Amino acid sequence: MLREPRCLPRAEIKGYDAVLHPTLGAWPIRVDVAQNNRQLPSPPFLHLNIEGPGHLYQFPHPYICFSSRFTITIAIMPPAATENVPAPAPAAAAAPKPEAQPYLSTMPSSDFSWQITLANKVIAITGANRGIGLGIAEVCLANSAKFVYSFDLMEPGEDFAELQKRYSNFRYIQTDVTSEESIENAINKVIEETGRIDGLVANAGMTKHQPALKFDREQLDKLFNLNVFGAYFCAQIVARKFIELGIKGSIVMTSSMTSYRPNRAAPSAPYGATKAAVRNMCHTLAMEWSQHGIRVNSISPGFVRTAMTYYVEKSPDWDLKMQYYGGMPRLADPRELGGAYVYLLSDASSYTTGIDIPIAGIVGAW
């Protein structure tokens, strides 16, 4: 334990005094010594800046004990050294900072509509030819989106065609989201056709359920290339376009409840890791891009009824699991997730960024 030192005017310092110089560490704690009798904070501390002419900190040697939690360096000054201790040299003039990009105001405009709507917005959704992506697209269209684009590598199927019959503003661009060039070409085509892009849902993904001891490197590479790197580059490329066009855009990534805890029904450590990466990256992207008026959030679905989860309700102990774990005893319709996506894509969420919204009616089963 380091006893509290006294801060004395130089005129009162006599004899041999131990003066604290630097300590090791990188977490600065500034100590104001403009007035007498200021005390250092109690340990542990990492770094101290001693400032102010006319004062020295007195550390009588017998009272200094070294702790395993921090390290200090002590210099012993003879009496003569305390009489004319030079004042600290003035700080050098700071170099001029490079001109920063102006912040784009995130405040709602005076004619702001407080409705949760996607009116006049152009939205792109990766992997929207089927499954969760198609459900999100339908809810976006039902909430007045001007155009919704599906970026998907697969050719559209019957479900896509059926939705397109109802909404002629639902379009498809074949896109490989593991290719930066393909992503950029798709986004540029949207802008060429509509003049803008307001939101992007990084939804495309894949899963593989098997024991962790059986995964090989090739299988992991496929999961991470699509689920993590694909989502990242979609976000990066569209963010550059938002900045270029001066649009306060919204990015929503599809994570998963497996990013929080294991899926007991069908465990997959690598899949859960990819979705945890997606959820985590949103926090940092939201922090970095908020100055440009860009919001980044994620949504973590639980069990959703898609072609990828057909096996869940077919398991022989499904009814027993529902009785034991509680929660809603069914899988979600993909459209039941859409409201959260619409909110995060809409202007109504203008102050919402860097969050994850879990949507799992049977969360207890995880």
Image (cartoon, rainbow, N blue to C red):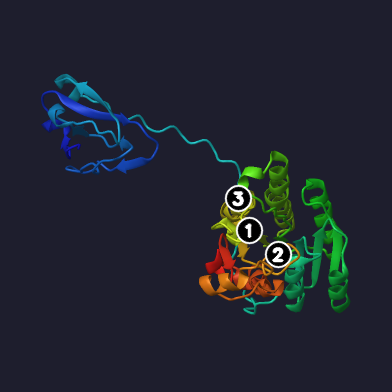
Question: Which label sits in the foreground, 3 or 1?
Answer: 1
Circle 2 is placed at which residue position? 311
Residue to which mark 1 is pinned? 266
Q: Few, some or many C-alpha atoms within 10 Å of disc 2 (few <14, some 14-19, many ≥20)?
A: few
Mark 3 residue type: Ala
Q: Is residue 90 above or below residue 142?
A: above
Secondary structure of the residue carrying numbered label 3: helix
Q: Amino acid at mark 2?
A: Tyr
- Position of residue 361 in the picture relative to residue 46 (left or right): right
The residue identified by callout 3 is 269
Give residue 150's position: percent from left, percent from top.
81, 63
Between 85 and 198, the residue placed more toward the observer is 198
Q: What residue is rendered at 28% in x and 33% in y?
A: 68
Q: Is residue 83 visible?
A: no
What's the CA distance linking mark 3 and mark 2?
18 Å
Q: CA distance from mark 3 to mark 1?
A: 10 Å
Sequence order check: which comes first, mark 2 or mark 1?
1
In the image, residue 246 above or below residue 217: below
User: What secondary structure is found at the residue carrying circle 2?
Assistant: loop
For image coordinates 57% across by 69% down, the residue present is 321
Locate the N terminus and report the quarter of the image it occupies: top left
Circles 2 and 1, Cβ within 8 Å, touching? The answer is yes
Total label count?
3
